[in-house]
Amino acid sequence: MTVTVITGGGAGIGASVARRLAARGDSLVIADRDPSAANAVADEVGGVAVAVDVAVPGSGRIVVDAALQTYGRLDAVVACAGIERGAPAAQISRETFEQVYAVNVHGSFDVAQAAFRVFERQGEGGRIVLIGSANSMVALPGQSAYASSKGAVLMLARSLAVDWAHAGVTVNVVAPGVTDTAMSSQSLSDPTKRASLMSKIPMGRPARPEEIAEAVEFLSSERTSYITGAYLPVDGGWLAAG
Ligand SMILES: NC(=O)c1ccc[n+]([C@@H]2O[C@H](COP(=O)([O-])OP(=O)(O)OC[C@H]3O[C@@H](n4cnc5c(N)ncnc54)[C@H](O)[C@@H]3O)[C@@H](O)[C@H]2O)c1
């Protein structure tokens, strides 16, 4: 049995990851700050739902404990919960900046650390996948909080990969480009913004969330035991185009 925790599993990329991992036979914990969204996905995939805000310290322990209580073990964690708060750098408030970091960076760290403590006790290694972004590497206007937080997610994964390799725990980043979810719906439904974004992407279209889930499935599988600290863009060629 493979037991996987997915934060932000109630919608978008996280929900697609839940469907993909359920299809390969994982037992799932769907964690989301939106309880009805978490419940709906958990019902659909046959998993257990946990309502948590990953920005709250200790939330990682709560979701990992749910896995242990329900299934008796833990094999993988996928940290999908994330927010974007676009604003010009001259105007963004300190509060908003910190809010983005609290979810994207601290939330990812919290659940990764809680998972590692369980992996260490189990003694069988483990898989941690953090969701970064093409914006871990390139910035767009108004993204001082978001892009820098996703850059931090990348270095967080590399740091954890180095610290935890001795225990057979891998930590990797899947980096979506523009993906068709609620997070990007405002930009994608504005014809000017959509055209500007698509002009950067050789494939000329956004990703479907299922296409991101394929990369997560790979990096959260047993067969990637020697891949750690990697950054895998799933971006239709955006970063390759420079
Ligand atoms: N959509 C894109 O274009 C895109 C591109 C690159 C990276 N990403 C990243 O992919 C991840 C998923 O994004 P998405 O597009 O699916 O977004 P989404 O807004 O469609 O879904 C995010 C989910 O996370 C949950 N969530 C948000 N904050 C939370 C918190 N504090 N605690 C618990 N749950 C929380 C939401 O309730 C929602 O269910 C994010 O980390 C995002 O930064 C998205």
Image: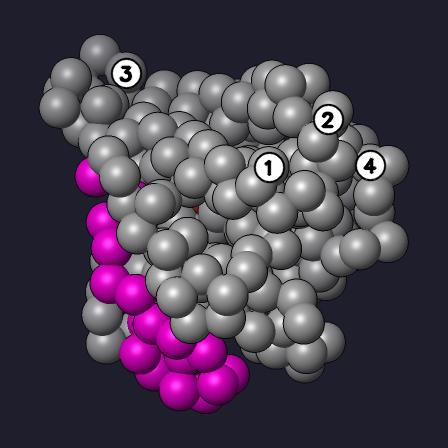
What residue is pinned by disc 4?
A: 227
Residue 97 in the image: state x and y as whole percent: 24, 23
Residue labelled with disc 1? 120
Q: Nearest the camera: 93 or 190?
A: 93
Please report the residue visible at 69 percent of the width from the left and 37 percent of the height from the top: 169
In the rendered structure, the answer to whether residue 191 lies left or right of residue 31 reads: right
The 10 Å Cα crowd at callout 3, few under 14, some 14 to 19, many 20 or more, is: few
- Any magenta on residue 50? yes
The answer to which of marks 4 and 2 sits earlier in the sequence is 2
Q: Nearer the viewer, mark 2 or mark 1?
A: 1
Q: Quadrant of residue 101?
A: top left
The residue segment tinted magenta is: 38-56
Quadrant location of residue 26? bottom right
The three-letter amino acid code for the residue at tag 2 is Ala
Task: From the image, state whether disc 4 or disc 3 is nearer to you.
Answer: 4
Residue 144, horizontal then vertical, whole percent: 36, 20
Closer mark to the observer between disc 4 and disc 1? 1
Identify which residue, 126 or 202, lies in the foreground. Answer: 126
